[in-house]
Amino acid sequence: MKCNSSLLSVLVCLWLSVAGAKAQSTNVKVGVVLAMDSWVGRVGNMCISMAVQDFYKENPNYTTRLLLSTRDTGGDVVQAASAALDLMKNVEVQAIIGPLTSAEAKFSVDLANISQVPILSFSATSPSLSSTSTPYFVRATLNDSVQAKPIAALFKAYGWRQAVVIYEDTEFGEGFIPYLNDALLEVGSRLQHRTVLPTSASNELINEELYKLMTMQTRVFIVHMSSPIASRLFLLVQQLGMLSKDYAWIITDGLSSLLESMDPSIIASMQGVLGVKSYIEKTKRLANFTARWKQYYKDEYPNEIEIPELNVFGLRAYDATWALALGVEKSGTRAVRFQQPIVGKASTNSTDLSTLRISPVGLKLLSAILDTQFIGLTGDIHFINGELQDSTFQIISIAGKGTREIGFWSPKYGLSPDLNQETLKKKSGYTASVVDLRPVIWPGESTAVPKGWVIPTNGVKMKIGVPVKYAFKEFVNVERDPGDNRLSVTGFSIDVFGAVLDVLPYALPYEFIPFEDGDGKMAGTYNDMVDQVFLGKYDAVVGDVTIIANRSNYVDFTPPYTESGVTMIVPMKKVQKSRAWVFLKPLTWELLLTTTWFFFFQAFMVWFLEHRINDDFRGPPMEQVGSALYFSFSMLVFAHRDQIQNNLSRFVIILWLFVVLILSNNYTANLASILTVEQLQPTITDVQSLIKKHEYVGYQRNSFVKDLLLKWGFPESKLRTCGTVDEYANALSMGSSGGGVAAIFDEIPKIKVFLSHYHDKFTMAGPIFRTGGYGFVLPKNSLLLSDLSTAVLNITEGDKIEAIERAWFGKKDRQPVSSSAATSSGLSLDCFWGLFLIVGVASIGALIWFSICFWNKNHSRFGVDEQGLCQQIKVIATVFNERDHSFHSSTQRKREKEVELNRDVALANGESPLSIVVSREGLPTEATTPTRSSSASEDDDDGSSIESLSSSDYDDHDAPTQRRDTP
């Protein structure tokens, strides 16, 4: 029994080992379609083999194993499709790695969609291949479209506005261009020209195209080609001197990734060229693989002395193989037979499409591959929409025998000098500036950044279109000499253009081409002339061309060099109306009411401060009111000599007299202006009234103003064209009913020219409809736009533009008369509110101070604690109405002292005491000494007579005095 048991155990172990061996040896057929005679194909094939070995070495327990079937395409599209068809039909592979080029992949993918066999390509980068239309295509590399933004970032950083792209006539070349153009437009640049070369182009054809490019202004070139034709291109570029100063060249990722494997002579012909290259982080795993790959290459090609550098396509092939191996294991794919043909009968022809079978595991395997995610040699490998996603790009410059790193680009941060986290944290976000890159040695060993364009060296002059004007030739005047037909172009706009060219740091050869027909007249409207720039007939247009939105859609303008706006010219008429109330016009109602209120307020203030001490402000109530108002209002015309006894009253009156003086002087000046200036007003001020009254209006022929009038609602039947300045005047003088027009609409610069001749009869009126002013016209994204715009601003901000205006339009001493200038506006409260504020505050302060003094002096008589509020107010009013005898007593004592002092002085001088009398104001004055009476006694020398005189004179000082006014 023990023996039998041992034998059974051995048999079981033997069976399990055999089953395990069978499980480990389950092979899945995979096709490899590459061009083995190319460097990319050779490296890719070796990396695929190494990937299979490494994968199963690291994963010995996996139950599947890739069995490779390799086909050589020889670089031919048809042969690549034939190889793929053979693998699907006869070998029944479950997946295919390859082919190399986008053109080859395009044919193979169509076959893969039929047989449902996933195709993984590590080098087909054209955006025209998409998993949307070809779901069984898996792009195990980057889409070419993602490198458009790094290139555009370089344009933004260096300030380049235009570029010429040179690409090959293949699926690889054509698919990238739309994305490049869109990316450049996003940063304000564009593709000026596209040069397409077939991969089989001869050197003669390449030279011919390069000669064309040399005659253009643009000096920034983007090369999107495969390495064979690109190598020949740069050799010829160097021979033609197109790798010298002022040139800039950029190569795309497909070429930048193969620079290490290119011939040194080719590298020498590419000095100063910039490159955009997908960035692969240097890791220990990558370094280890590179060392093993060199040994593997040496073993495969022992006769080759120099081992070339490993390129990114080999690394992509390695990662693609790992992704496929993981997908096969994950999906559990086994070697199964394909399903029966879709249509037709079986055929012995190995390339008969009718016998193409369908893989039963294709869809499951495709899903497993797309779900794969791992860290490969090139970084994080995961597929979105059937392809690898955006990654970081490295910006390189070719210098010496190799390349030099000048920066990086990432989708989040844009350009940066390195990928250090501290550097990236300092960035505020996405940026693309020259400071984000390291210095570059440009073609011609120049360290200065090329500006991206130069003046063409082929001797061709810029074609400048100019309008042939019938009127307003002050702006542009085109004449031909009858003798030799020599062209002469002068005018304000021409002189401004010449001044702008003088500011440029380089010479700009040009010639004027009149926009005229066979009869020498304007060949169309201004819009038609601007169209010629868009169509390429003119390189620019110089003249009185207005900047408007519609034109800016397809051409560019420099900043304006004149005023902007459209308004109307109308006749002026004299104002015929009564002037009975013209004396009220100098003052606005606000100022008039405020001044009147202050007169009443000052009357109250003087009465309040003088009532208790001054008999002029005492008596019956109506007499007091009349005296106070008379005193206040009469200050407008004369100064009072009434005795004002309170110092607070004097302070308030002085301030108020100052305000009255300023008001009266301004009133007089304003009234004189109104009475002497002739009253002129425009006949029409409203555009809508012209439309409602169905008036005829005029406009400058060939002008865009006609479109504006139609837009505003004027019927075309009510529009009449006008030409010269005299035609303007005649049409306006005749009026709408007399065969003329009621108003003429034109641009402000032309209106000013017209009014300089007829400023006394016509004027500008109505609202001003804003436009952009006059500017120079250039093609969209013109390389000259930036320099010309800067030059125009320099001219308009300096004195040069004023000198040109004086030369063509004379001095600015004749301004058009308008309704606002013909009449003088009334004085407003805004001009004087500060004065009223000072007087008001001072008066209220005086009122408060007087009230405090009055209360302190008489509060004992008010009986505050014993009486009600009404009784208290009545008592206060009674006390206030009483005469202030204390004020008069102190005044009398002061005067008596003055009289005694004057008497002593008179006696000391031997004069008669009677020579001193006291004036009404209380000041001593000299008077004629009266003759003593014969009956007078000598004994009167004791001075009693003087006392009698003094006493009699002052006994009646409290009597009402008679007012004496001086006009």
Image (cartoon, helix red, strand yellow):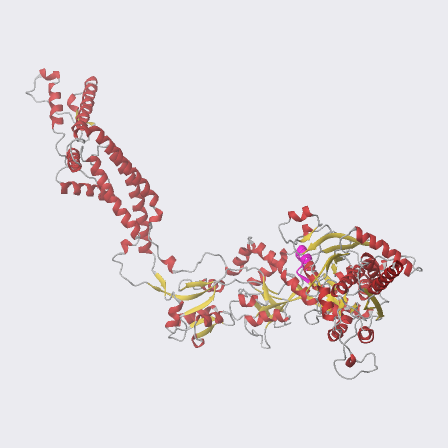
Does the rendering let one see residue 479?
A: yes
Q: Is residue 289 left or right of residue 774?
A: right
Q: Is residue 152 above or below residue 436?
A: below
Query: What main secondary structure does the magenta stretch of the protein show?
Result: helix
Quadrant in which the C terminus appears = top left
- Residue 56 screen position, x and y as percent: 82, 59
Residue 65 lies in what quarter of the image?
bottom right
Considering every residue shown, the one lying at the far left of the view is 935
Quadrant in which the N terminus appears = bottom right
Does the rendering let one see residue 459?
A: no
Considering every residue shown, the one lying at the far right of the view is 303
Q: Nearer the viewer, residue 289 or 627?
A: 289
Residue 309 lies in what quarter of the image?
bottom right
Q: Is residue 285 magenta?
A: no
- Residue 166 screen position, x and y as percent: 74, 66
Q: How many marks?
A: 0
- Residue 483 screen position, x and y as percent: 63, 72
Residue at 83% across / 81% down in the picture?
A: 349
Q: Is residue 159 magenta?
A: yes
Q: Nearer the viewer, residue 960 or 913?
A: 960
Q: Is residue 503 above or below residue 100?
A: above
Magenta highlight range: 152-162
Q: Is residue 831 above or below residue 45?
A: above
